[in-house]
Amino acid sequence: MNSGRCAACRYLRRRCPPDCIFSPYFPSNNPQRFVSIHRIYGASNVAKLLQQLPTHLRAEAADSLYFEAQCRVEDPVYGCVGLIFLLQQQIHNAVSQLAKTQAEIAVLKSQAQHPQAQQVEVEPEFNNFLQQQLDYVADLNFSNQGSSGFM
């Protein structure tokens, strides 16, 4: 067996030509990289895609295909879109928590400036301010949902 073959040619059991489209992106020391991509996209489709791209973009394309194939193997229904959705939820939760914290800071600053005000008066003010902040965040999130189509 020729050890100079790339992972793609080795997996496909063929001779690796000197101008092999796969060899720069699928080295023989990492066969799983090609296997994942081949399982999802097929060798022929990947070869066509890489050949259509300029040489300087092929490495990024191979990396992206590998990442997307791995996500599809882990989550056959949503693939990398499931990961994007999860990250969007985390961003939404962080923005909501930030709005709550900013509202609490505003109330505490208000209390520090007016220490003679009673606690009973501050509580409804805080709740109103907090609700306004949450409504604002919800409006922002709703306007972004229309473009993503998934949330």
Image (cartoon, helix red, strand yellow):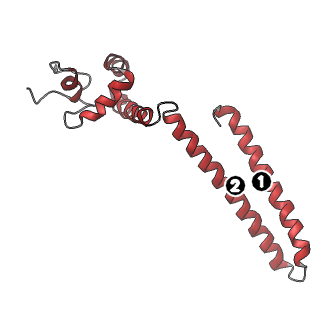
Q: Residues within 10 Å of mark 1 (few under 14, many from 20)?
A: some
Circle 2 — which element?
helix
Type of amino acid at the residue the image marks with label 1: Leu
* Spatial CA span between label 2 and label 1: 7 Å
Percent coordinates x, y for residue 18 in the rendering: 16, 21
Residue at (74, 50) in percent of width and height = 137
Q: For the point 89% across and 66% down, which residue is it?
A: 124
Q: Earlier in the sequence, mark 2 or mark 1?
A: 2
Q: Relative to the observer, which residue lies in front, 150 or 146?
A: 150
Choose between 43 and 54: the one closer to the eye. Answer: 43
- Please identify the quadrant where the N terminus is shown: top left
Relative horizontal placement of residue 61, taking residue 144 as reference (left or right): left
Residue 96, label in figure? 2
At x 84% / y 63%, what residue is drawn?
Answer: 127
Residue at the outermost left position: 1
**Image-based side of 117 in relation to 96, left or right:** right
In percent of the image, x 35 and y 28: which residue is there? 37
Which residue corresponds to mark 1? 134
Q: Quadrant of residue 104?
A: bottom right
Q: Is 6 positioned to the left or the right of 89 in the image?
A: left
Query: Toward which corner of the image does residue 23 lie, by quadrant?
Result: top left
Report the disc number at residue 15.
none
Q: Quadrant of the C terminus?
A: top right
Where is residue 90 drawn, in percent x and y?
Answer: 59, 50
Q: Is residue 105 above or below residue 29?
A: below
The percent coordinates of residue 30 (x first, y second) are 24, 37
Q: Residue furthest bottom?
A: 116
Direction from residue 18 to residue 101 in the image, left or right? right
Contact, CB < 8 Å: mark 2 with mark 1?
A: yes
Q: Amino acid at mark 2?
A: Ser
Mark 1, secondary structure of its residue:
helix
